[in-house]
């Protein structure tokens, strides 16, 4: 009764409310793939893939072409045996990780319908709500300060600030934002925009200015493990890996080589199966975790809300992409200011 009988992929395009700028990249639209898993008894599970060529090397056209293959791979599988389906989809870990994530979540979403229990409870039910930050993209100093002030007043106590294009201007922006929102804390994300030297300069100067940075995320290139390790020991702020940390194997190498204090899990990079392994790695080695997003709509952010609440593993949550898109909300969660509350 609970066997998979069909899988469909559908392209969904969402416009950003305004252009979203990070270091050396600007996005105007999110091109996502909505995945539906159909069961013999009529239940349907929904997931979303939000591909990134910059991070994962994915192209939407290539992901859509996988529809028949994925259907063949998992048809006939019982969603109650979801770890079997997870293992099958692990074959896409390097080639199409966002599709892996979408199918794995859609499997749990279908199981949720069968059991009449929300996905976060299937994943452990550790928390019934989480708190997200909200991102301030790269812009002029005055615009970023005003957005930071407005966002803080809306109830977001942690702000994610994008930097990485100009060291001097970035320092000036962080000091000005801190002066405008002195009670806020900041996750600062350079998206690989710095060298090790400029990253150290940024961290030390901002620290001297008493800016409350709680995480300094991916300051340098993803494959520069030596640079990350050097930076980790020179920075007064905790260093997080994002683009460097895709699979559980990447995270194992980062931890073994003492490169990071935090890892930013994104389901679009790792899928649920590797994300669960990374959670256990972090617990074992006392490494901090945050959870982030790509360009997911509310359907995709839903996946991370349930994963984060279910595992209860994260110190920081950066689940705000749905707030940047023009869409009709369809997520299985409620939002109250910075509170994200998973629902059935």
Image (cartoon, rainbow, N blue to C red):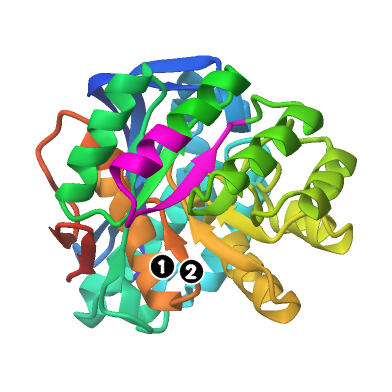
Q: Tell me the quarter of the picture where residue 71 sits.
A: top left
Q: Which residue is more in the foreground, 36 or 94?
A: 94
- For this orientation, the residue located farthest to the left is 328
Q: Which residue is more in the foreground, 256 or 280?
A: 256
N-term mark: 2 or 1: 1
Please rate how many residues cluster around mark 1, counting C-alpha atoms within 10 Å: few if below 14, some from 14 to 19, many from 20. many
Where is the C terminus found, in terms of image quarters? Answer: bottom left
Count up the numbered dots. Answer: 2
Left-right relation of 141 to 311: left
* Mark 2 secondary-structure assignment: loop
Q: Mark 2 to mark 1: distance in Å? A: 7 Å
Residue 314 image label: 2
> Which residue: 34% across, 54% down?
184
Q: Which residue is more in the foreground, 259 or 127?
A: 259
> Which residue: 48% across, 42% down?
99
Q: Tell me the quarter of the picture where residue 56 sits.
A: top right
Q: Is residue 76 visible?
A: no
> Which residue: 30% across, 21% down?
142
Where is residue 127? Give x, y as percent. 33, 81
Please rate how many residues cluster around mark 2, counting C-alpha atoms within 10 Å: few if below 14, some from 14 to 19, many from 20. some
> Which residue: 39% across, 62% down?
107
Would you place residue 282 above or below residue 214 in this image? Answer: below
Would you place residue 154 above or below residue 296 in this image? Answer: below
Q: Is residue 202 visible?
A: yes
Left-right relation of 315 to 204: left
Where is the N terminus found, in terms of image quarters? Answer: bottom left
Q: Please state the extent of the stretch shown in magenta in the rendering.
A: 175-191
Where is residue 133? Give x, y as percent. 34, 52
Q: Which residue is mark 1?
A: 308
Is mark 2 in CB contact (under 8 Å) with mark 1? Answer: yes
Where is residue 102? Give x, y as percent. 42, 49
């Amino acid at each position: 009764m609970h066997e998979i009988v069909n899988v469909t992929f559908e392209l969904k395009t969402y416009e950003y409310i305004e252009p979203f700028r990070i270091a050396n990249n600007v996005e105007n639209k999110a091109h996502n793939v909505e995945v539906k898993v159909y069961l013999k008894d009529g239940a349907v599970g929904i997931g979303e893939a939000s591909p990134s060529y910059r991070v994962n090397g994915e192209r939407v056209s290539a992901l859509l072409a996988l529809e028949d293959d994925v259907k063949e791979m998992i048809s006939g599988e019982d969603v109650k045996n979801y770890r079997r389906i997870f293992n099958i989809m692990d074959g896409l870990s390097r080639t199409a990780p966002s599709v892996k994530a979408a199918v794995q979540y859609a499997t749990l979403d279908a199981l949720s319908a069968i059991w009449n229990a929300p996905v976060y409870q299937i994943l452990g039910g550790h928390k019934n709500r989480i708190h997200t930050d909200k991102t301030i993209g790269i812009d002029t100093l005055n615009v970023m300060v005003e957005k930071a002030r407005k966002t803080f007043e809306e109830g977001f106590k942690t702000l994610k600030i994008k930097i990485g294009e100009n060291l001097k201007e970035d320092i000036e922006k962080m000091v000005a934002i801190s002066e405008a929102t002195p009670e806020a804390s900041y996750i600062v994300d350079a998206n690989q925009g710095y060298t090790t030297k400029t990253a150290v300069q940024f961290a030390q100067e901002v620290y001297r200015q008493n800016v409350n940075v709680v995480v300094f995320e991916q300051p340098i290139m993803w494959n520069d493990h030596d640079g990350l390790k050097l930076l980790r020991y020179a920075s007064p702020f905790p260093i997080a890996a994002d683009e460097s940390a895709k699979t559980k194997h990447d995270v194992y190498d980062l931890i073994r080589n003492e490169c990071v204090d935090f890892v930013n899990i994104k389901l679009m990079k790792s899928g649920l199966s590797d994300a669960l392994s990374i959670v256990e790695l972090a617990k074992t080695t006392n490494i901090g975790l945050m959870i982030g997003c790509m360009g997911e709509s509310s359907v995709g952010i839903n996946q991370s809300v349930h994963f984060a609440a279910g595992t209860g593993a994260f110190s920081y949550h950066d689940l705000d992409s749905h707030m940047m898109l023009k869409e009709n909300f369809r997520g299985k969660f409620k939002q109250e200011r910075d509170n994200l509350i998973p629902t059935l």
